Structures are given as structure tokens and as C-alpha cells.
Amino acid sequence: MEEKKFDVNSIIGFVLIFGILIFMFYQNQPTPEELAAEKAKQEQIDAAKASETLEKTSTTTQTPQLDLEDSTAVANYQGALGAFGFTKPSNDITILENDVLLLKISNKGGQVVEAKMKNFVTYDSVPVYLVKDGNSSFGLDFSTADNRVLNTADLFFEPSLTTSNGNQVLSLKAKTSNNQFLEYRYEMKPNDYLVDFTIRSQGLNGVLSNSKPVSLDWQLKGIRHSKSIKYENRYTRLTYNHEDDKISKLSEGSDDEETEENIKWISYRQHFFSSILAADEPFKSGVLSSKNLVEEESRTFGFTKDYASVLQLEVEGGEISKDLHWFFGPTDVKVLSNYETLGLDDSIPFGWGIFGWINRYVFTPFYSLLSDFFPYGVAIIIMTILVRLAMSPVTYKSYLSQAKMKVLKPEITELGEKYKDNAMKKQQETMKLYGKAGVSPMSGCVPAIIQMPIFYALFMFFPTSFALRQKSFLWADDLSSFDTIFELPFYIPLYGDHVSLFPILASIAIFFYMMMTTGQNMPTQPGMPNMKFIMYLMPFMMLFFFNNYASGLSLYYFVSNLITIGIMLVIKNFILDNDKIHAQIQENKKKPKKENKFQRKMREMMEQAEAQKKN
């Protein structure tokens, strides 16, 4: 009865503490005048930082625009290019477009200067751009036979747009004569995010230097698409395939650089969208780098990562020939799995090892199937119910272990009193009691260990599943991001400047779940922290953590803990019988217990320690 009172008082105390904290935050909130001044000051700081970062981390080669009306300037420019000055300068743009993708390709450099997703928008309803306003640069660095060092980003190309079998084909040639040229060839298919891209030369064996290498230089700054730039940046990462389909990644939180060999593709992932360069035949070597541009949360800063790759191209017989592919599109398994031969679906962050395997081959297709028949939030609830039912045998084992420990608690307490001055003997006798009763104190931990792969797989699934992007449920506008029921007029460290409801509900459910399990039977040792208080504190910590996480994940944990509580109540009230468990333990005590090698070794070590203590 006394323990029941403690539980009620604990709940009341928890609610009071939470209420006091909210009251303190409310009382200390700034006035509207202070908020306006602070907002204006922060906008100035963000703008200054954005300008400074752009200057420091600019990835593009911004060459001055050539005034085509100035004949002297044109003549000087063509003279600087040597043989490649043959092509007539033109700043025109060619558009390649299908139902899903729009590309703008400039005659200057022959490169993509704009890539727009036609069927997706950002959090503030602006079209999703992967390339725009000079955030990207692509070119070949090479030397000529007359000792000029050039980059194709500075060359002018002559365009020719045709169709072939329903595909749009754009040929861009940087000429040294009518029959000698370097060609970029783009081929766009209908309703496809993948664009075939070929680099080849004709008749340049006497123009290109035979002694110096040719390198491909591709740089891009990731454009912000989500309302929380820190959250988006967490899943913005350079991923690449190398050394016979080995998948590696650069750091997502700090600057990183690697030199690799046999690179098949490089993905500049921007959370839910990716810019990928893939090769039919791997690049022999390359240097890949990533710079983190996000230091703190900001509502105005526009870029996340600064990516760069320098890849070596082979020159055979003085000529260049390389078959490549550009992918500008969603990081969606339904889309990327269409390019099986290139293995682009490996760029999706499913997770590591067995956790990624579960996410990729179990949860992703399972949720995709459910969402074909049910609304996205309802599909999460159904998936949660089925997962918890599948794990109910594990829940039963866990609760059975707790029930056995509860039955043995009076005897363990008696041993504690009997050997209170001899900790070694107390531990030795307690282990003997466990052995005779057929109870393992670790058996309660095994179910939790079994569930860890499921936990981690789902932890990666909800924030990275493209199927959840901008899908609403109840008050949540986007299940792949945090829900907001109230905007705070101030910022709370670790918590943020908003209140999310799903994390509150999930934390309350976790709180009551812990009260039903560890809270009731957690002993408090003298001189040790109050473990009950720690277990009650955990839901409060989870409330802070999940406030900036995917609302779909919070919804899952809320429903999951409700179901688990229900299952445990059924087990407790209708399945388990404490009298039968006690009788079974007593029967186990009567049976001779055979020790395995490990148990015998542990007993001998404890006995030796006890003997040494007496001597």
C-alpha cells in the first residue's frame, strides 16, 4: 500500500515539476518590443553569416561575363583559349524537360546551371531546386599541347538539340575546327530523373597534352529545403560507391576529405533529394570532400553542405571517352531501385549492418504496402500494432522474468540483511538462490537486446523515408519532420522554439510504461543514485530529444507504448499467476542444479576471493 502511495506521489511530483518549468519559461519570456528587436538583430546576424559563408565556401568558378558586343574583348578571350577559341561565344541556355525534371544547360561551360524538380516543393511551397543561382560548377581541367591550362567551365560550346526514339538529345561541342571538338552529350528520357551524359573528343590527339592528366571537377552547395536546417543537415551527406561496390560516406557533422580508387558513383545527398554522378566504368581515382556550413539553427540561411569531387579521366590515344549518368531527383527507394545496374538505391541511408537490412527489406516495403491502402498516419499505427504483436512473445518473456524476480524479492531482502556486512558473501548467496530457483537476473535484459535492431531500424526509417515527406496526419503537417502546435516566443536550449504534441504524448506513455516495469521493482542502494528518479527522468529527456525529430517516430513510440502497456496488463491479469510462479520456483529449488563451466568458474573465483578475505 505504501508503494502505491509512492507511485501516485511520483506522478504528482513529475506533473508539478513540469508545470513549474513551463510557468518559469512563460514568466521569463521577453516582451513584444524585445522580441521585435531581437528578431531584427538575429536577421542581421544571419544575413552577415550567410554572406560570409558564401564568400568563404563558394564552390563555383565565377568567371566574368564576356561582353559579346565588345569585339576587342571577344578577340582577346578567344586568343587566351588558343585552339578552343574557334567556337563562337554565346551565353544562350538550352532547356531539357520531361514530366518530372527540368534542366537548364548553358553554352558557357556546357554545364547544368539549373535543375528543378517539377513535382515537389519545399516546406514553404517553393519548387525544389538542386542546382540554381551558381551553387554548382562542373568542368574538365586539362592542358593543351601549347602549354595552356584550361577548364571547360570557361569554354563556349555550340549546341544542337534533336530527338531520338522519343528522347531529347543535346550535343554541345567546344570546337577547335569544324571536325575537331570536345563534346558533352545529354540524353533525357520521358518521365525519368536519370540523364545519360557522355564526354568524348574527336581529333584532339594533337591538341591535348599527352603528358598531363585530365581531371573532372564537380562542386555543389546543398540548397536548403526544410524548415529546420539543422535537422535537414543531419541527413545531408556525401555517399559514394567504390572498390567493387563498397559504400562509404563522408562525415555528416564536420569537414571531411578522402582519396579513393575505382569510384563508380558519387551522391551529393540533400536529405530527401540527391544529385548523383555515376559512371559505367569506374573512375580510377578521385578526391572527395565535404564541408559543413551549418553551425546553428537559422530560419534564413540557405545552404547545408559544400561538396567537391576531383576525379581522374583517362586519355587514350590523345582522346577522351567517358559514359556517365546524371541523376537529379528524390532519394526515394521506389525511384532509385529502377537503376539496379548502377546500384543507386545503395545511396539511401537505411542504416548500418543488420539494422539497415531490417529497414531496407522489412520496414520500407512493409510500410509502402500499407500506405497503398491506408492514409499515411493510419499506416504507421497499423504497422506499429503488427510490430508490437509480433514482439509480444518477447514482452511476455520480459514480464515473466520481472514476475520471478518479484517473487524472489523477500528472500533477496533477507539475504541482504543477513550478509549486510559482507558484500562478497551476499553476492555469492544471491547467485546461488538464482541458480536454485532457475532464475537468471539477465533474462530481463535479453528481450531488450533482441528489440534493439528493431528500435534502431525504425529510428532511421522515419526521418529518411521519402514516403513520409510532407504527408500530414491529424495536427502534423509533415510526418518526416517535427509537428508544431505552438510557436514559442523564445528559444529553449536542446528543446527549440516550438512545442510538438506527439513527443509529449510519447513521453507520457513511456513514463507510465516505466512505472509498470522498472519503477515498481527498482531497488535503491545506500550511497547510490535513486534509480526510480532516473527512470522517471528519462521520459522528460525523451521529450526534449523528440521535439525536433520526425513526428512519425513520436507517433510510433506513442502507439507502441500504449499497445505494450495493454499487452502487459493482459499478461499480468489474465496470463501470469504469481502463486504458480512461486510454486514452480520452489520445485526448481528441489532439483539438482548442474553447473556449466562458466558458472563453476565464477563460483570458484568468488570462493577464492572470500577465502583470501578471511586470511
Image (cartoon, rainbow, N blue to C red):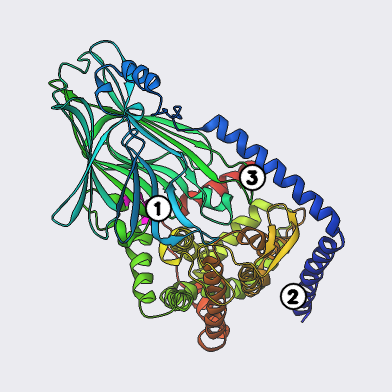
Q: Tell me what residue is drawn at x 31 percent, y 59 percent.
A: 335
Tag 1, which secondary structure? strand
- In the picture shown, does residue 159 fall above or below 432? above
Badge 2 or badge 3: first in the primary sequence: 2
- Look at mark 2 in the image and give the residue it sits on: 7
**Are discs 1 and 2 less than 8 Å apart at CB?**
no
> Which dot, 2 or 3, sits closer to the camera?
3
The disc, 1 or 3, on the residue closer to the chain's N-terminal end is 1
Measured from the top left, where is residue 296 in percent x and y? 64, 45
Span of residues in magenta: 346-356
Q: Measured from the top left, where is residue 456 in percent x and y?
A: 47, 58
Q: Quadrant of the C terminus?
A: top right
- How far apart, in angstroms, are the residues tagged by discs 1 and 3? 27 Å
Report crowding for label 2: few under 14, some 14 to 19, many 20 or more residues within 10 A (C-alpha): some
- Image quarter for residue 307? top left
What residue do we see at 75% from left, 79% from top?
4
Residue type pointed to by label 3:
Glu
Towards the viewer: 480 or 31: 31
The dot on residue 116 is 1
Q: Is residue 28 visible?
A: yes
Circle 1 residues within 10 Å: few <14, some 14–19, many ≥20: many
Circles 2, 3 touching at the beta carbon (< 8 Å) = no
The residue singled out by tag 3 in the image is 296
Q: Which residue is depicted at the point 58% across and 57% down?
A: 227
Q: Quadrant of residue 362?
A: bottom left
Give the residue type at disc 1.
Lys
113 above or below 194? above
In the displayed structure image, the side of residue 212 where residue 240 appears, left or right: right
| Residue 201: image location, x then y, percent | 17, 29
**Residue 175 or residue 436, whichever sits in front:** 175
Q: Amino acid at mark 2?
A: Asp
